[in-house]
RNA sequence: GGAGAGUUGGCCGAGUGGUUGAUGGCACCGGUCUUGAAAACCGGCAUACCUUGACGGGUAUCGGGGGUUCGAAUCCCUCACUCUCCGCCA
């Protein structure tokens, strides 16, 4: 959420940035200016009446103490008590409508973000390694997975449905090895603190990070009594960022760097027919997430660091990748700047997103009310939040299987991962 | 699931329905004293919103919501959370 005062004072800037995102400012902002003026007028009207009521009430106390008649004042407050709720209701309605507009405004892209309409105008900022060379036609992971007996879609469909997978044997172990490998790297070498959050969260948390109210269709909802349904987390970003909701952090503690390995649940509504093969797009996948809480002045430096931490996982695993700066038209709703890391998948001959690292500036912090107290200042301010995948474990699994496949159908385990898997190679599983 | 106790400002902790945004202490900030520091003493110290050129003024907030009353931190209802005991359970 943007700051109301900022939007009011910089309406033309907001309109321009919305246009850069490919949105129609008029459609997003609607009658912001009128509503804003009406809201303030309504508040003033309510407060004037409340002030009158309070004054009359004070006089009642004085008169009664003095043993005098206070019936005039009592009548006045009684009347006001009936009138105030109507005005209050009107003011609240305006407040709600204005807030809805404010909540529907996406974050403003940072000045360093390339302007563009779609993913085709994203800008490649780095490329690491080289695609592996094969003297045979490399296969996609769904073929390899089934041949090796480590991926099972049929039984997954039986027990859960489409877009689920069962991992068997070394396939399951590879997933666990990758998670441990990533967590160890981030906690031992990059200074992150590991957390294990709940996988079900309340609506307030989903609002804090921006999934609600706009993107309810992408989420799995779990009934839990009236009005207090829970939601399966679509990413660890939700519970981890909300850890500090409604809190004021000590400036000396910043930046706070957290990492969490969790499952992620996405309904993938509207993605029918897209990425139907393999485990690229699943209702449940696991991810190691990196989250930072930063002072505003170094959040962009922290974004570079966080991105490099995610890239280092791929480097240690010897996987070819490129890093893209997303353009204004391709960025997520809450982000001010995003880098996508895309890993090379030889079985499919394409780069595929494996991590998305974003600086949300104060957009989430304002929504979730996460503040810090700058040194020497008495007033607390909103801090900046960042996060990125470090990495999506399922897609890393895919990258390992496709990039390290051998002519005989087996898959080599990269050296850095061998201690975690306890094997050098995945051989076809005996029936 | 059953029974009981609680939720007050950054923290601890008072609070008889009527200048209580709220006593006091700690923490924090400024000052006096000191070579410096500590101690002591003095002063300051909530948040959001509305309003004003500014000084200032106003409104709301004592877990959330609702009610009683001329007036609620204080009385009533309700919900959430925390703690204790019982039951059940990985």
Image (cartoon, coloured by chain):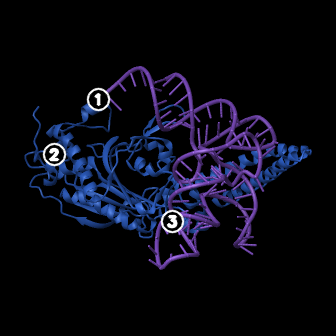
Chain colours: A blue, B purple
Q: Name which of mark 1 and mark 2 comes first in the sequence.
A: 1
Q: Nearer the viewer, residue B1 or A321?
A: B1
Disc 1, SS: helix
Disc 3, SS: helix
User: In this rendering, would B3 be left or right of A189?
Assistant: right
> What chain does mark 2 sit on?
A
> What chain does mark 3 sit on?
A
What label does residue A17 carry, if any? 3
Q: Position of residue A374 (x, y in %)?
A: 49, 65
Distance of label 1 from label 2 (alpha carbons): 28 Å
The residue at the point 33 percent across, 44 percent down is A262
- In the picture, residue A278 is in which quadrant? top left
- In the picture, residue A273 is in which quadrant? top left
User: In this rendering, would B89 be left or right of A44?
Assistant: left
Q: Name which of mark 3 and mark 2 comes first in the sequence.
A: 3
Q: Are marks 3 and 2 in contact (CB under 8 Å)?
A: no
Q: Is residue B55 above or below residue A221?
A: below
User: In this rendering, would A83 be left or right of B5?
Assistant: right
Disc 2, SS: helix
For the C terminus of chain A, give its image quadrant: top left
> What chain does mark 1 sit on?
A
Q: Nearer the viewer, residue B1 or A160?
A: B1
Question: Alpha-carbon neighbours of circle 3 within 10 Å: few (<14), some, or many (≥20)?
Answer: many
- In the picture, residue A157 is in which quadrant? top left
Distance of label 3 from label 2 (alpha carbons): 48 Å
Residue located beneath label 1 in the image: A158
Instruction: Spot the residue most to the left.
Output: A408
Residue located beneath label 2 in the image: A421
Q: Name which of mark 1 and mark 3 comes first in the sequence.
A: 3
Q: Position of residue A220 (x, y in %)?
A: 42, 39
């Amino acid at each position: 959420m943007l700051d109301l005062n900022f939007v009011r004072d910089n309406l033309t800037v907001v309109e321009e940035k919305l246009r850069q995102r490919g949105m129609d400012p008029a459609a997003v902002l609607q009658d912001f200016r009128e509503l804003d003026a009406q809201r303030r007028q309504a508040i003033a009207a309510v407060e004037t009446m409340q002030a009158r009521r309070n004054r009359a009430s004070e006089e009642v106390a004085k008169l009664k103490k003095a043993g005098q008649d206070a019936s005039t004042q009592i009548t006045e407050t009684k009347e006001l008590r009936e009138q105030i709720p109507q005005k209050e209701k009107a003011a609240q309605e305006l407040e709600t409508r204005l807030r809805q507009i404010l909540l529907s405004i996406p974050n403003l892209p940072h000045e360093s973000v390339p302007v563009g309409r779609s993913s085709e105008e994203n800008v490649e900022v780095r490329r690491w390694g080289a695609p592996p060379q094969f003297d045979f036609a490399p296969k996609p992971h769904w073929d390899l997975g089934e041949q090796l007996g480590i991926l099972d879609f049929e039984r997954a469909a039986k027990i859960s449905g489409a877009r689920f997978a069962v991992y068997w044997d070394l396939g399951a172990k590879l997933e666990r090895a990758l998670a441990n490998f990533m967590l160890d790297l981030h906690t031992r070498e990059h200074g992150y603190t590991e957390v294990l959050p709940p996988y079900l969260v309340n609506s307030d948390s989903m609002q804090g990070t921006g999934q609600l109210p706009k993107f309810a269709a992408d989420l799995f909802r779990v009934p839990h009594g009236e009005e207090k349904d829970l939601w399966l987390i679509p990413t660890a970003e939700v519970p981890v960022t909300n850890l500090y909701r409604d809190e004021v952090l000590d400036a000396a503690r910043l930046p706070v760097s957290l990492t969490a390995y969790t499952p992620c649940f996405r309904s993938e509504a509207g993605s029918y027919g897209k990425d139907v093969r393999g485990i690229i797009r699943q209702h449940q996948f696991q991810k190691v997430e990196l989250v930072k809480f930063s002072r505003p002045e170094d959040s962009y430096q922290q974004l570079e660091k966080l991105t490099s931490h995610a890239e280092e996982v791929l480097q240690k695993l010897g996987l070819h990748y490129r890093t893209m700066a997303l353009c204004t038209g391709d960025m997520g709703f809450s982000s001010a700047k995003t880098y996508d890391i895309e890993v090379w998948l030889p079985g499919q001959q394409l780069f595929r997103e494996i991590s998305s690292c974003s600086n949300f500036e104060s957009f989430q912090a304002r929504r979730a009310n996460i503040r810090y107290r700058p040194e020497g200042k008495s007033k607390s301010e909103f801090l900046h939040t960042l996060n990125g995948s470090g990495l999506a474990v399922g897609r890393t699994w895919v990258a390992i299987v496709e990039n390290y496949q051998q002519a005989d159908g087996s898959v080599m385990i990269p050296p850095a991962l061998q201690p975690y898997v306890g094997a050098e190679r995945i051989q076809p599983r005996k029936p």
